[in-house]
Image (cartoon, rainbow, N blue to C red):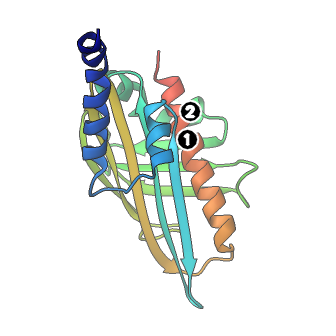
Amino acid sequence: MKAVFFFLLLPVITYSSELKDYFQGKQKLSPQQFEQLQKGEITSFSNVESSETEQMLDLYVAAIHPKKCNRALRKISLYEKYSNFMDFITKSTYDESKQEIYLLFEHSVLPSRMYIKFKIPRVKKEGKYPFIFEEGMFLGLKGNIHVKKYGRKCIMYMDAHWIGKKTKFPNVVMEAFSQTLTRLTLDKLIRISKF
């Protein structure tokens, strides 16, 4: 009986180990965040610090998509359709030749209307995809989107880092809206790409 129980748990143990190994060196997950991922929830973190003249943002968001990566990414990679998928994105375009995405956000969590424009290739398969903001409030923000097969599911993880001119937003406000917005966006992308 114990042997049968062990073999039933083996995939869970293997997946847990694989998940821990994957995030090692990327982002140290707390036990609570690791548990959130295992349950299929989104985990995110934002930290903002400032000096008299500069502000610094460290941000990450991660989730396990319930579908295989290639299936999930079919819809997620349609950046120009994000305004159709998410009510808080009022405009979305993608220039394939420049690999440039433009998104206009309007949401109650935001202190004002906000746009982001950044370079990123279409995320169509597993891998690491670097991106950079070349204009706007977060000029110079750099990050990566990571996509990795996880059994019959898909790990999706984004990290971003920025140091720039101090904004008019207090640290706690910037933390709240950056974390909430990335979380909402990933949640919506997972929902629309399940089917």
Res 15 seen here: yes
Mark 2 to mark 1 CA distance (whole Å)? 5 Å
Q: What label does residue 31 carry, if any?
A: none
**Which image quarter: residue 151?**
top left
The three-letter code of the residue at mark 2 reads: Lys
Residue lying at 32% horizontally and 35% vertically, measured from the top left = 16
Q: Position of residue 7 (x, y in %)?
A: 24, 16
Q: Dot 2 surroundings within 10 Å: few (below 14), some, or many (20 or more)?
A: some
Mark 2 touches mark 1? (CB < 8 Å) = yes
- Decide if residue 37 is on the left or right side of residue 21: right
Q: Amino acid at mark 1?
A: Thr
Could you classify mark 1 by the number of other residues whose Cα lies within 10 Å: few (under 14), some (14-19), or many (20 or more)? some
Front one among 172 and 109: 172
Tell me what residue is drawn at x 56 percent, y 71 percent. Answer: 48
Q: Identify the residue under disc 1.
A: 185
Q: Is residue 45 left or right of residue 107?
A: left
| SS under mark 2 | helix
Question: What residue is at 47 percent from the left and 15 percent from the top?
Answer: 195
Q: Nearer the viewer, residue 35 or 64?
A: 35
Circle 2 is placed at which residue position? 188
